[in-house]
Image (cartoon, rainbow, N blue to C red):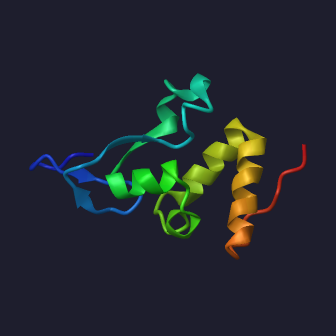
Amino acid sequence: MLDEYGFLFCVSCSCNHPDGGHSHNMPVKHFPELESDPKNFKLRCMDCHKALDFPDFKKIILFKDFPQLMEYRREKDIHEFNRWVSCLLAIGYTEYQYIQE
């Protein structure tokens, strides 16, 4: 949300940034059916937005809304969820397990 000075309060890092905007949790380039889903976007600063666009999992696991990002993926696309689990395992993060179909 924006504060009284017009700064963005990022849901992922809680910092105020003037350069932010909405950021899709799952990219609409690959998931066009989710473009208008209100649960698919949040207000994020540009740094966090870039971390999602070009997945930087070492940064993403530190996001305050990381559990919600994972839950959204699990609900919307099992393959996308499992792809992220693979990437998380590759950096040594073992809090999530693959979902069998």
Residue at point 19%, 51% (across, down): 18
- Is residue 1 found left or right of 26 in the rendered image? left
Q: Residue furthest bottom?
A: 92
- Is residue 34 found left or right of 97 in the rendered image? left
Where's the C terminus, which quadrant?
A: top right
Residue 43: image location, x then y, percent: 35, 45
Residue at point 84%, 51% (across, down): 99
Residue at point 43%, 53% (across, down): 50
Query: Up-down: is 72 above or below 96?
Result: above
Q: Nearer the viewer, residue 30 or 101?
A: 30
Query: Up-down: is 11 above or below 80?
Result: below
Residue 21: image location, x then y, percent: 31, 42
- Based on the displayed image, in which of its 4 quarters is residue 10 positioned? bottom left
- Is residue 70 found left or right of 78 in the rendered image? left
Q: Residue furthest right?
A: 101
Q: Nearer the viewer, residue 41 or 68?
A: 41
- Based on the displayed image, in which of its 4 quarters is residue 29 positioned? top right
